[in-house]
Image (cartoon, rainbow, N blue to C red):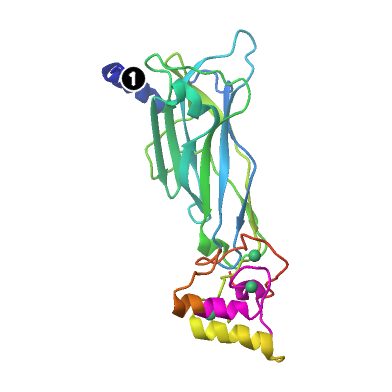
Amino acid sequence: MRDQGPILIAALASLSLFFGVLSPVSAEQFTFSTEPSTIDYSSLSGIGLGDVRVRLRENPPPTGPLSFLDGFSFSLSNDPLVFNCTSLVPSGIMLFLNGGNGPQLATVDIAEDGVTARWIFAVSGGMDVLFPSDIEIARLTVKTISETWAENEVGGLASFSDQSPASLDLVADVAVVSGEPIEANWEIEPIVFQPGPRGFLRGDTNSDGVVEGIPDAVMVLSGLFDPDVQLNCLEAADLNDDGMVDLADPIFLLNWKFGGGPGPSGPYPNCGLDPTPDSLDCAQPAC
Ligand SMILES: [Ca+2]
Ligand SMILES: [Ca+2]
Ligand SMILES: [Ca+2]
């Protein structure tokens, strides 16, 4: 590849000035938006993870053609007690720019209270782009703050705000056209947080949070042969994941723990849902 470093750096230096300074031009011309999103969390642990997609569009100009963009920057902030972001990656058209190389410069900063992104894709002869309708530009991974959502059986709404996060350098919401930053606005949809189905730990048949050879095998045997004992989570007792609980399951467990046999399948070693759904249920989910 041809070395365009000096040109790029000079151009970026001039552009970077703009990213911190709002231009008064056409505040309504460009709109960033977040898609409506739903995130499931465990109502026991409060842990949940999901995606929020970010889009950009140029609102139809009263006259004249649409603009070719050289890049953009944006920031979003969040209440760090409710949720935060763990990643922000380019998506959709962004990945195909410049022969599959993506933006020529992509700067992403993530903090507990928000994210900022500056992506430039047409500084030194790169590909500038039209945004005639809402086009997905980024995918944010959002994680619940577990302490806030644990034991919440109802769920709730929360939203990003268009403020630049207090803990990061100021980054303006702008689209860059011919080197000129144009202030953009935001349309932000709320994120729906809802309690998802509770899970189980395969092998933890006595529901004490750990999988042990003797106690958990004895529990399955008791459930099978003692009419006074009822297994409270049949999915956890199905060690070999064949959709049945029978003598083969405690044998599987003991063979794994003491005979070098294979270990249980998912969700072990985590607490979660059955990756191979079957008719077994879990009357008292563990997580
Ligand atoms: Ca156990
Ligand atoms: Ca089984
Ligand atoms: Ca299964």
- Between residues 83 and 269, which one lies in front from this camera angle? 269
- The residue at the point 63 percent across, 8 percent down is 63
Q: How many marks?
A: 1
Asked which quadrant contains residue 57, the reply is: top right
Under circle 1, the secondary element is helix
Q: Residue 264 location, x and y as percent?
A: 53, 69
Quadrant of ligand 2: it is bottom right
Residue 137 visible, this angle = yes
For label 1, count other residues whose C-alpha is less than 10 Å away and answer few (under 14), some (14-19) or many (20+): few
Left/right placement of residue 180 relative to residue 62 reads left
Q: In the rendered image, which residue does mark 1 sit on?
A: 14
Q: Residue furthest left?
A: 6
Image: 239 above or below 142? below
Q: Residue 73 location, x and y as percent?
A: 45, 29
Asked which quadrant contains residue 207, the reply is: bottom right
Q: Is residue 274 magenta?
A: no
- The residue at the point 57 percent across, 42 percent down is 52
Kind of residue sitting beneath label 1? Ser
Q: Residue 213 location, x and y as percent?
A: 49, 81
Q: Residue 211 location, x and y as percent?
A: 50, 77
Quarter in which the C terminus is drawn: bottom right
Chain part drawn in magenta: 230-254
